[in-house]
Amino acid sequence: MLTTCLNRWLLLAVLLCGPSLTDALAATTDGAPATEPAPATDWTDWSDEFEDDEEELAVADPLQTFNRGMFWVNDKLYFYLFKPVARGYRFVVPEPGRRAVGRVFTNLSAPVRIVNSGLQGKFATSLEHTERFLINSTLGIGGLFDMYANVDEKPAVEDFGQTLGHYGIGNGAYLVLPVFGPTTLRDGLGRLVDRLVDPIPSPYYLKLHDHEAWTASAAERINWLSLDRDTYEAIKEQALDPYLFIRNGYLQRRAAAVAR
């Protein structure tokens, strides 16, 4: 009984931390897709860029003391729980297999991109996502193979947080939540809505049991983290203030996503 409870809490922690963790790391990889982390780079260049833009970036961070405390908690979870699990998974599963798994999860989340592109009036983008989803689900065997891998131009990734921003709704306060990680009031609400459309957690599609949805989501996040090339470690080593670096990177990435 105790073992079962511990396993459920572990899966839940990975599930909840996963989206924000990947968002935070993606904020420093110039919007690289979640299944294809960008290679390590010189983060001092990014730090200089953030310093130059500091006055232009409007940041509502009234809970910074709380946020920094939660940043410390999530930092420890990353180093002592999530990263060791991902490294073990990386040791067992070869990279081509992990990339194929990542493509399957990316393909499964296509309804989120399709719906939000349409809600923003980007109907051509929505149709392109629909086409890719249908082709990769059939000819690509559920997304194991990306039939559009050789196409350089990829449609923009959209979510409900971006949809709200598209219609003029601001970020609201910046938050770092325990386990959930970095977000804003707007993006947090957007994430809840997206879960109704995403086939894995949604009660309307695959209709998975709770433990099945937790397991699938945990596998997706651990798979992504296993492909990451120690991005967060590089930030910790080179950024003067990792908290500000992650915060500014997250907000700038989200602002760019809304503006495109």
Image (tube, rainbow, N blue to C red):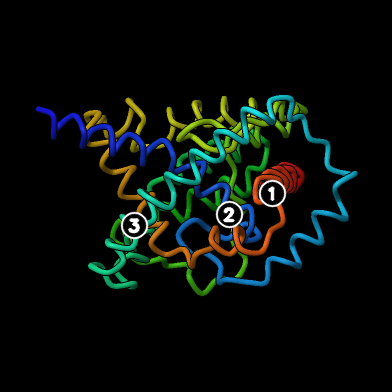
Instruction: From this view, report whether residue 26 is shown above or below residue 159.
Output: below
Q: Which residue is mark 1?
A: 253
Any mark on residue 26, and which?
Answer: 2
Check disc 1 and report its element: helix, strand or loop.
Answer: helix
Image marks 1 and 2: residues in contact by CB distance under 8 Å: yes
In the rendered structure, which amino acid carries the disc numbered 2?
A: Ala
The structure residue drawn at horizontal position 21% and vertical position 29%, both measured from the top left corner, is 209
Check disc 3 and report its element: helix, strand or loop.
Answer: helix
Image marks 1 and 3: residues in contact by CB distance under 8 Å: no
Counting other residues with Cα less than 10 Å from the Cα at mark 2, is it few (<14), some (14-19), or many (20 or more)? many
Mark 1–mark 3 distance (CA, rounded to whole Å): 27 Å
Instruction: From this view, report whether residue 84 is shown above or below residue 13.
Output: below
Instruction: Please state the horizontal and vertical placement of residue 108, each as a whole percent of the image.
Output: 38, 47
- Quadrant in which the N terminus appears: top left
Mark 1–mark 2 distance (CA, rounded to whole Å): 8 Å
Q: Which residue is mark 3?
A: 84
